[in-house]
Image: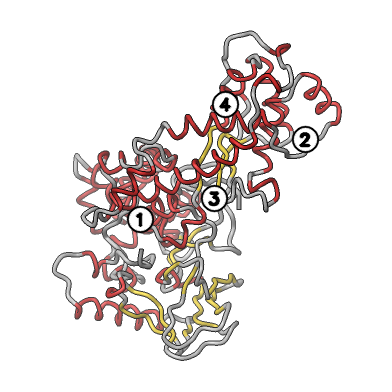
């Protein structure tokens, strides 16, 4: 698929009736505003260009050769749209301070957008999107095309709604006079629905555009969905004008954002020829998350696709396959937790099953957890005595259990690889439907590849260690007995 900028779904591009003149005018107004901001600088060797002919909205192009380590543009923190730069912090300082970074930025963006032309960022707002293809906006029918993919469980719309209503709607209603253009919406008996629409737009903009702003005070709570709290550090976030209009391409990445004490700088990380586009990179992001966060996918990120395997499912298969009793499974899971190996889910990547890679491309923690779960009583006792995790090694028992888990995982999809390939040959299947097919197909390709590898490592039951001492007892194991979170291989 063609590249698309983070800002592709901008107001000019998606609103009905817009023409080339309006698109270009908004671009010019934005660039004039950007260059007029105190402390902002931009290289004369770049320009913000109209890339709609490539299906890429706006993008940044080199108009002269650029050398490695050249500054492309610099933005002071005061120009970044954030909770610390908006004057909302002066209006409700205490109430804004207690919100986590995501919610505070959502509220600030609602506040600034309500001011219209009076906002310092009005020209920036004009090139931000009003429509999205991110998963939070998909219908149930469209989401059904992603059946089997773990990404559906990460959308978090219901949890986001609760947070928006409990925290933000309450504040906005209490201080309705501050939210000018939205005061009527907040006074409406059906204010909740209108406010949620507004809040989701801002949250989607943050998901797709915002950067972590290092050097500012960090909040204690956050999560990767950008709605609720988790146990990961979450620095303050901000909308960084122009930086968020760079396309992303992991293979052609030639620029990077650097954090200074008082500003942010985009630098060239390699030589860029005249006429070449300047690309950012999302890192090792699977296409499922690319679709969830940004509303599009590209083949360049296909190599980062993953299939998530539930550790609870693995435990149940171990008990069924080897006869390990529930209480023993829980003891083994607790040991893995003590060694900081336990996760609720593990990722299988396209590297899994590659014998030329360490651990054959598997997450070593997954293999160690599986070894702890499948070890016989003597091996388990020796592990505890050694007081250190086992060396990652895929045994025949582990291979068989993982293969059974993959067989179950494959059954969660409603189509086969062959059926998906046939569907993709139909030129009439486009947009969200096509993206869903490509995401689920990538995951099933991983399952097929890894399953073939594991089949070669599997041996019959009769040739495996006797674990009958652990047999007996009905399964009562639940993954939340030992806690843990998701592990992603980098």
Measured in 3D between alpha carbons, the distance from the residue under mark 2 to the one under mark 4, in whole angstroms, is: 23 Å
Of circles 3 and 1, the one toward us is 3
Dot 3, how many residues are within 10 Å of its Cα: few (below 14), some (14-19), or many (20+)? many
Which residue does the numbered mark 2 point to in the structure image?
Answer: 390
Which residue is labeled 4 in the image? 480
| Residue indicated by mark 3 | 350
First-in-chain label (1 vs 2): 1
Instruction: Look at the numbered disc 1 and give the secondary structure of its residue.
Output: loop
Judge depth for marks 2 and 4 and give the one in front.
2
482 relative to 210, above or below: above
Residue pictured at 50% horizontal, 82% vertical = 72
| Category of crowding for the residue at label 2, using alpha-carbon neighbours closer than 10 angstroms: few (below 14), some (14–19), many (at least 20) | some
Residue at image mark 1: 295
Q: Determine the CA span between mark 1 and mark 2.
A: 41 Å
Q: Is residue 178 left or right of residue 461?
A: left
- Sequence-wise first label, 2 or 4: 2
Closer to the N terminus: mark 3 or mark 1?
1
């Amino acid at each position: 698929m063609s590249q698309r900028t983070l800002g592709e779904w901008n107001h000019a591009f998606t609103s009905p009736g817009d023409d080339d003149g309006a698109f270009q005018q908004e671009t010019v107004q934005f660039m004039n505003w950007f260059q007029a901001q105190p402390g902002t600088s931009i290289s004369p060797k770049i320009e913000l260009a109209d890339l709609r002919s490539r299906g890429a909205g706006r993008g940044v192009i080199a108009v002269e050769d650029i050398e490695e380590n050249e500054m492309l543009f610099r933005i002071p923190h005061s120009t970044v749209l954030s909770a610390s730069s908006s004057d909302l912090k002066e209006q409700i300082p205490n109430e804004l301070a207690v919100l986590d970074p995501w919610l505070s930025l959502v509220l600030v963006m609602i506040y600034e957008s309500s001011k219209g032309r009076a906002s310092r960022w009005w020209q920036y707002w004009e090139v931000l999107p009003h429509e999205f293809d991110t998963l939070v906006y998909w219908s149930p029918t469209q989401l059904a095309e992603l059946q089997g993919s773990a990404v559906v469980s990460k959308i978090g719309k219901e949890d986001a709604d609760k947070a928006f209503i409990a925290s933000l709607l309450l504040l906005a209603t209490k201080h309705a006079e501050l939210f000018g253009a939205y005061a009527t919406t907040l006074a409406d008996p059906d204010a909740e629905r209108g406010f949620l629409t507004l809040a989701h737009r801002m949250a989607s903009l943050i998901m797709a555009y915002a950067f972590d702003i290092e050097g500012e005070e960090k909040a204690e709570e956050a999560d990767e969905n950008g709605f609720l709290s988790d146990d990961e550090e979450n620095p303050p976030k901000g909308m960084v004008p122009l930086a968020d209009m760079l396309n992303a391409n992991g293979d052609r990445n030639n620029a990077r954002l650097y954090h200074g004490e008082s500003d942010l700088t985009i630098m060239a990380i390699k030589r860029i020829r005249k006429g070449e586009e300047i690309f950012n990179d999302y890192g090792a992001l699977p296409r499922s998350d690319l679709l969830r966060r940004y509303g599009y996918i590209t083949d360049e990120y296909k190599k980062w696709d993953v299939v998530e395997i539930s550790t609870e499912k693995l435990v149940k298969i171990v008990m069924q396959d080897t006869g390990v009793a529930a209480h023993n499974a829980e003891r083994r899971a607790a040991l893995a937790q003590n060694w900081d190996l336990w996760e609720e889910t593990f990722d299988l990547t396209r590297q899994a099953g590659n014998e030329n890679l360490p651990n054959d491309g598997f997450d070593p923690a997954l293999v160690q957890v599986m070894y702890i779960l499948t070890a016989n009583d003597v091996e388990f006792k020796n592990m505890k005595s050694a007081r250190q995790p086992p060396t990652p090694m895929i045994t025949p028992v582990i291979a068989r259990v993982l293969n059974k888990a993959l067989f179950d995982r494959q059954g969660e999809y409603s189509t086969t690889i062959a059926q998906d390939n046939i569907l993709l040959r139909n030129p009439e299947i486009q947009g969200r439907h096509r993206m869903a097919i490509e995401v689920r197909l990538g995951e099933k390709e991983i399952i097929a590849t890894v399953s073939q590898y594991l089949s070669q490592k599997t041996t019959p039951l009769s040739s495996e260690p006797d674990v009958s001492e652990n047999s007996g007892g009905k399964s009562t194991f639940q993954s939340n007995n030992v806690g843990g979170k998701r592990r992603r291989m980098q």
